[in-house]
Amino acid sequence: MMKPEASVYSHFTKCFQNTCISKPVSHKSSNSDKESDDAKTTPHVPSDLYKTTATVPRKPGGWKAMPFILGNDTFERLATFGLLANFMVYLTRELHLNQVSASNIIYIWSGLSNFAPLLGAFVSDACVGRFRTIAFGSFSLLLGMATLTITAWLPKLHPPPCSSDQLKLGQCLPPNKAQLGFLILGLGFLTIGAGGIRSCSIPFGVDQFDPNTDEGKKGIKSFFNWYYATFTVVLLITSTLVVYIQDKISWSLGFGIPTLLMCGSIVLLFIGARIYVHAKPQGSMFTYIAQVFVAAHKKRQLKLLDDKETDRSQFYDPPVKDLLVQKLPLTNQVRFLNKAAIILDNDLKPDGSRVNKWRLCSVQQVEELKCVIKTMPIWASAIVSFTAMTQQGTFTVSQALRLNRHLGQKFEIPAGSLIVFSLITIGIFLPIYDRVLVPALRKITKDEGGITILQRIGIGIVFLSPGNGRSRFH
């Protein structure tokens, strides 16, 4: 039995595992055996919706592909984070932009880069597949990084240097339109690259394992562990070594090294091309979502019966042929969407398939959309945390430039390396939380994890909010 306080998070995780825990709509039936039989066999068998997720081939793949996929992903993150970890300093010191202008450029680029994966996912699922999307994104990313490296290397692409006193007094020449345009061109390529890589890197790794086997399930878990372990290592390296090279040696070298790493990332990606499992595109989830809304709107005049009067046969509920997808039962949450699955005259062909996908949707489509809707509050609450995280690369760096960062007489901590203290804090707190707080909380809450993940998110937001408010006074 799921505890009440965990219900929202359970919907979030279960729905994305295609195992929705909502209570299904009850149907007329004289006995439970008949209900189970009806659930297994339905008169409407589709020929157009739930096709098997064909892959070519299913073997090899697995861990044989992981060195290439994780290597590609690690080099890509080393490149992008290494390029942008100290970007605020580059914009203010080398391009002589003021703090507000530099922050706006970073925020706009960050926002577009986080929106682009939605488009990348659509293109990948509907047209070209994940491997080609990642390959295209990698080349685009390389172009963007090479462009930014050139801006630091060629004197004509950035303003003439000036002294620190002139910089403080605002007497340095700002970049002209051509210089700023070349910079924005590079960021545009980076945005396109982010849309291709971020949308597909994790799903492409998961594609290499068969979730229907115990070995495949263990492989997927291990893949996530390795993915986030390399992510942490990348942050440490880019926040220390790469930032130090940019700050103390040369910006062109500091940008050039990540660009070369991106070249290595592309090479690794293509070396393993024959090993990968290539899942064929099966259509975009955004199209399926739109179909449900359109079909429900077209049938908005229909009246839904009460639970006791509901007849299962009025809904288009074909069996799911894809072995990787679990069947979802019809629920009464967001009930108006159920109209999209009501069968009317001339909605079905003689073979049981749909005449118009934009007029009739399956119960599975409707319930998958409901699962997405249930995640919206969690997504919205995450805006607070991402606002704080984004500021670490802008205003936190700007404030650090005004601090005395010397350790002794010779060494000075680069402003862009202050994020390391956040990583160190996390590294110290996690063992304390796991070994001290969780056992103590488990005795009180009787929850295996001490507190639910939803509660952890809420506590994090509570601490972030005053921190964000306090930062505006600096």
Image (spheres, rainbow, N blue to C red):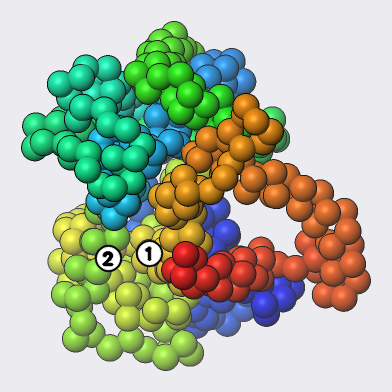
Amino acid at dot 2: Val
Assign a secondary structure to mark 2: helix
Can the viewer see residue 296? yes
Can the viewer see residue 328? no
Please tell me how crowded label 1 is: few (under 14), some (14-19), or many (20+) other residues with Cα within 10 Å: many
Please tell me how crowded label 2 is: few (under 14), some (14-19), or many (20+) other residues with Cα within 10 Å: many
Q: Position of residue 82 (x, y in %)?
A: 45, 29
Q: Residue at x 67, y 77 (%)?
A: 5
Q: Position of residue 409 (x, y in %)?
A: 65, 31
Asked if 314 appears above or below 64 in the picture, the reply is below
- Whether label 1 touches label 2, CB < 8 Å: yes
Distance (Cα) linking label 1 and label 2: 8 Å
- Residue 62 lies in what quarter of the image? top right
Q: Does label 1 or label 2 sit earlier along the sequence?
A: 2
Horizontally, residue 296 falls left or right of residue 322, namely: left
Q: Which residue is mark 2?
A: 292
Front residue of this view, candidates 304 and 231: 231
Q: Position of residue 184 (x, y in %)?
A: 19, 37
Q: Position of residue 352 (x, y in %)?
A: 28, 55
Asked if 337 appears above or below 425 in the picture, the reply is below
Front residue of this view, candidates 289 and 465: 465
Q: Which residue is mark 1?
A: 369
- Residue 372 lies in what quarter of the image? bottom left
Amino acid at dot 1: Leu
Front residue of this view, candidates 132 and 170: 170
